[in-house]
């Protein structure tokens, strides 16, 4: 197990290889489809003008994402009425939905770790080599266990997106994950896909 503390340096990232188990500690952000689309369209492609608190949120999340981690997670959160927020469940969301956006977000903000489940595609893998960064596979079906690694909810942005889609700022300790895409072009997901395709072709040819 490699103990990693956020923010992550390029040297730390380059030391990681596919298959390495890690325990992540520090402050990270959650972000799913709506947040990624908002970041790309508003601040990277500039397809829409900033509205409301967009600029203030952008300035707040920039230093958190620089060298930081973004977690594909739609948490179940207690304390919404009192704003004494607490994560009840924090399982990973399937990451492929963010493939159209993730590489651009990583490059623009300097994100070094993307966390989710199911892996991502070639655009994100290229960004992992460029930034550099890694994709960390979190444990699906262990939402309550992962929530126990969340020491505190530090804040939340864009709650108007809805609780699952908001940008939650959380402090974690020993968040468990495995490197499945590294900064050297390694992708466990691509290997499994290639092996599965080869088996399927054999079955179809039989």
Image (cartoon, rainbow, N blue to C red):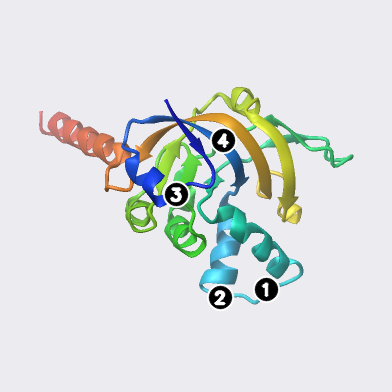
Q: Earlier in the sequence, mark 2 or mark 3?
A: 3
Q: Which mark is residue 25?
A: 4
Which residue is at the front of the view, 32 or 17?
17
Callout 4–callout 1 Cβ contact below 8 Å: no
Q: Which residue is mark 1?
A: 50
Q: Earlier in the sequence, mark 1 or mark 3?
A: 3
Q: Earlier in the sequence, mark 3 or mark 4?
A: 3
The quadrant of the rendering that contains the N terminus is top left
Q: Which mark is residue 46?
A: 2
43 vs 30: above or below: below
The quadrant of the rendering that contains the C terminus is top left
Q: Earlier in the sequence, mark 4 or mark 1?
A: 4
Callout 3–callout 4 Cβ contact below 8 Å: no
The residue at the point 49 percent across, 41 percent down is 115
The quarter holding residue 153 reads top right
Which residue is at the front of the view, 33 or 152?
152
Decide if residue 179 is in sight here: yes
Residue 127: percent from left, percent from top:
37, 56
As measured in the structure, the alpha-carbon distance from the residue carrying label 4 to the one carrying label 1 is 32 Å
Q: Which residue is mark 3?
A: 9
């Amino acid at each position: 197990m490699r103990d990693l503390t956020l923010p992550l340096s390029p040297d730390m990232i380059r030391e990681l290889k596919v298959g390495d188990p890690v325990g992540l500690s520090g402050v990270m952000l959650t972000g799913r489809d709506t947040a990624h689309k908002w970041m790309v369209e508003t601040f990277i492609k500039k397809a829409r003008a900033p509205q409301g608190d967009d600029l203030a949120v952008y300035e707040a999340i920039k230093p958190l994402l620089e060298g930081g981690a973004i977690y594909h997670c739609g948490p179940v959160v207690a304390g919404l009425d009192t704003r004494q927020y607490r994560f009840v469940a924090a399982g990973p969301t399937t990451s492929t939905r963010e493939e159209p956006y993730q590489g651009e977000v990583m490059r623009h903000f300097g994100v070094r770790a993307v966390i989710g489940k199911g892996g991502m595609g070639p655009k994100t893998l290229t960004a992992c080599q460029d930034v550099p960064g890694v994709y960390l596979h979190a444990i699906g079906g262990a939402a309550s266990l992962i929530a126990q690694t969340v020491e505190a909810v530090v804040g939340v942005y864009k709650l108007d997106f809805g609780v699952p889609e908001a940008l939650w700022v959380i402090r974690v300790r020993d968040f468990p994950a495995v490197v499945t895409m590294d900064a050297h072009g390694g992708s466990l997901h691509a290997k499994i896909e290639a092996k599965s395709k080869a088996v399927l072709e054999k079955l179809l040819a039989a």
